[in-house]
Amino acid sequence: MKTTTTRAFQCVGILAVGALLLTACGSSDGGGAGQAAAAGTFEGRGPITFVAGKDTTGAIQPVLDRWNELHPKEKVTFIQLPTDADAQRQQMIQNAETKSDAYTVLSLDVVWTSEFAAHQWIDKLPEKQFPLDRMLKPVVETAKYRDGLYAAPASSDGGMLYYRTDLLKKAGIGRPPATWAELKADCAKVRKLPEAKGMSCYAGQFQKYEGLTVNFAEAVNSAGGVVTDADGRPDVDTAAAKEGLDFLVGSVKDGTIPKEGITYLEEDGRQAFQSGKLVFHRNWPYVHSLAGKSDIKGKYAVAPLPGLSGPGSSSLGGHNLALSSFAGNKATALDFMKFFSSEENTATLLKEASLAPPYASLYDDPALVEQYPYLPVLKESILNAVPRPRVVQYGDVTAAIQQEAYAALTGSKSSAQALKDLQEALRKSTGQ
Ligand code: GLC
């Protein structure tokens, strides 16, 4: 288990990587692609677009409809991209590279802020116009680059362990597993029940995409390892990191993770869990609301992610609203970003789609906690989450992690070799 102190040091380290890289790559706040958009000018009113990954919750269009009713001359159109985070990033980069004005407000994954800001694909925002002091601090950090605000925190994300309360209870287990060993032992007991026939134990996101980066980092962190060390250098060729990766590799080998689990993105895992195929499932908070409308309604709960010798730690996820530098109608866009990221709207998204709000007070509101008992687990998950490297070259970093983690999971490389090669690749892509 990682202590809070270690995590705090690690975050500093990760920021340090970012700082070094930025110096190394010589990006500056002036010049480059972003010249088209003079910082600080938000002019023009009229139609805009909101660009995000496919809305699997169904809760986003109603928000846009509310905006459109209030602003008939400044309507927002929803452009939905694929669910896969890497595909979203590629399309957003393509839009920026062609300086297209097709995308106005981008729902930017928290790990892309540095890259998009450094390339001046997104505008610096007027910080004072957003109530950042009421938001969770780690969430606000994800929207910053070189002390400037480049996105409005809209929804956070922390990984949680979904588990079948009904089956654990029947198997005589009175608490969710806190360690990987407990997860395996609990699953073995559950699988002896007639009602668990054909069920698999566990799945997260192990397809070769951003979700794998998340799940790999969580395994490493939850075994006490790091991807980058306290000084911001890649430090993944370690015994602790190997224990983390070995948990995943071993789980594929011994069937804890079913074979098809290696093809899962978030939605595949959610569907498997909801249709009763999994006892345990790692996923984001949005699943809570959808599973509550499925066949397993009332039969599941959430717990912190398990780790090697105690509770593990999540990667910090989420999406912030950024303004494309190449868009028109920026005055409308800024107002829309304030509307969408307001406490009122994020509370609605919490209630309707269990999306994690950036506002601290919503997690402690007794009425909300009573109605949504997962909120304290979610808050802990977010506050203790480990950010993925905040680097301009995030695309290279995540590609290297995906490649090596996938090679280990599919057995084409040993864990030791994969970590050795990953260390080398990260050293190269971060210039360390
Ligand atoms: C979720 C998270 C995001 C992460 C992605 C990986 O959408 O909010 O941060 O990168 O999952 O699949």
Image: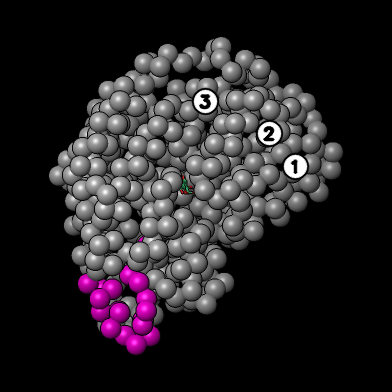
**Earlier along the polypeptide chain: callout 3 or callout 2?**
2
Query: Residue 257 at x, y = what percent?
Result: 32, 64
Secondary structure beneath label 1: strand
The kind of residue tagged 1 is Val
Secondary structure beneath label 2: loop
Q: Residue at x 44, y 75 (%)?
A: 276
Query: Residue 173 at x, y = what percent?
Result: 27, 78
Quarter of the view holding residue 12? top left
- Answer whether residue 149 is visible to the viewer in this image: no
**Earlier along the polypeptide chain: callout 2 or callout 1?**
1
The kind of residue tagged 3 is Ala
Q: Residue at x 30, y 42 (%)?
A: 404
Task: State if disc 1 and disc 2 touch (CB < 8 Å).
Answer: yes
Residue at mark 2 to residue at mark 1: CA–CA distance: 9 Å
The kind of residue tagged 2 is Thr
Out of 350 and 272, give the one closest to the viewer: 272
Q: Residue 117: which disc?
A: 3
Secondary structure beneath label 3: helix
Question: In the orientation shown, which residue stands out farthest toward the left?
Answer: 239
Out of 257 and 414, give the one closest to the viewer: 414
Say if disc 3 is inside 8 Å of ligand 1: no
Q: Which residue is mark 1?
A: 76
Please state the extent of the stretch shown in magenta in the rendering: 185-203
